Image (cartoon, rainbow, N blue to C red):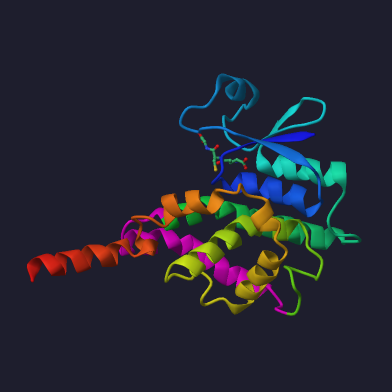
Amino acid sequence: MLTVVSFSLCPFVQRVTAALEARNIPYKVDFISLKNKPDWFLEMSPNAQVPVVITNEGTALFESEAIVEFINEEYGPLQSRISNEQKAIERAWSYQGTKLYLAQCRTMSAKDRESFEQRGKPLMTALSKVEEQLSGDTKYFSSDQISNVDIAWMPLLYRADLVAQHTKHDFLQQFPKVKKWKDSLVKTSIAEKSVSSDFFQKFKDFYLTNTYISGYEAQQSAHCCAESC
Ligand SMILES: N[C@@H](CCC(=O)N[C@@H](CS)C(=O)NCC(=O)O)C(=O)O
């Protein structure tokens, strides 16, 4: 069975586990601490980053893009009969999505409005571009069949969904077609299955506690007002 070496909050790991879940491929997960990476991990991971996938042959694969390509080739593509042009378009949009993972993490971690807005700019620009690209007539990015580009955007859209459900911030508010796409993806349950059972608790502790999106700044100013009264 494949083993995915993981850190629970990592969107790059979720892209890989979602690609496996979407194909019903069984896998084991080994969680590591990124603050204290074990020697066995450092020996097998040239970039010292998760995800790493250990294949049935015992080979360690690294870089999520290469791992997703391996899954596609080893277990078959999610979409049948896709033209080379469409394949290139979806690859490019997948890249656009994965480029935003860290921008989203940084935006969610912002402590004040100024840094939240500053860090969120590339995210908002990219979301407006994808809004223009979506037809709004299909369940997923380009058809009613889930594909690699949907999987690539899933970690980001799943996190946006959690933020919208549990705070007053909705990253997708101005983007109705992206929101509809996100709803279709969330309904598949692939996102939920591709994270650990304690994912939400960890996500909440990290991004929804003492951050701008958690209402931290509002609480701080309420506190200041209370003190000055
Ligand atoms: N380009 C890598 C990025 C993976 C990545 O950034 N992983 C982060 C966790 S989300 C990591 O392992 N960070 C630890 C480090 O860089 O020391 C990929 O696509 O696999």
The correct choice, above or below, for 208 with respect to 172 in the image is above
How many discs appear?
0
Q: Is residue 158 magenta?
A: no
Outermost residue, left side = 229
Question: What percent of the width, then of the height, locates residue 167?
Answer: 43, 67
Outermost residue, front side = 197
Q: Main secondary structure of the magenta part?
A: helix
Question: What percent of the width, then of the height, locates residue 72?
Answer: 82, 47
Residue 92 can be seen in this image: no
Question: What percent of the width, then of the height, locates residue 56?
Answer: 81, 30
| Residue 65 relative to residue 222: left or right | right
Q: Residue, x 42% and y 51% (percent of image)?
A: 205
Q: Quadrant of the N terminus?
A: top right
Q: Which residues are magenta?
A: 109-136
| Residue 79 relative to residue 182: left or right | right
Question: What percent of the width, then of the height, locates residue 135?
Answer: 71, 77
Ligand 1's quadrant: top right
Q: Quadrant of the C terminus?
A: bottom left
Q: Residue, x 81% and y 45% (percent of image)?
A: 25
Outermost residue, right side = 81
The quadrant in which residue 68 appears is top right
Q: Residue, x 34% and y 65% (percent of image)?
A: 215
Residue 91 can be seen in this image: yes
The correct choice, above or below, for 175 with respect to 40 in the image is below
Q: Residue, x 73% and y 40% (percent of image)?
A: 67
| Residue 4 relative to residue 56: left or right | left
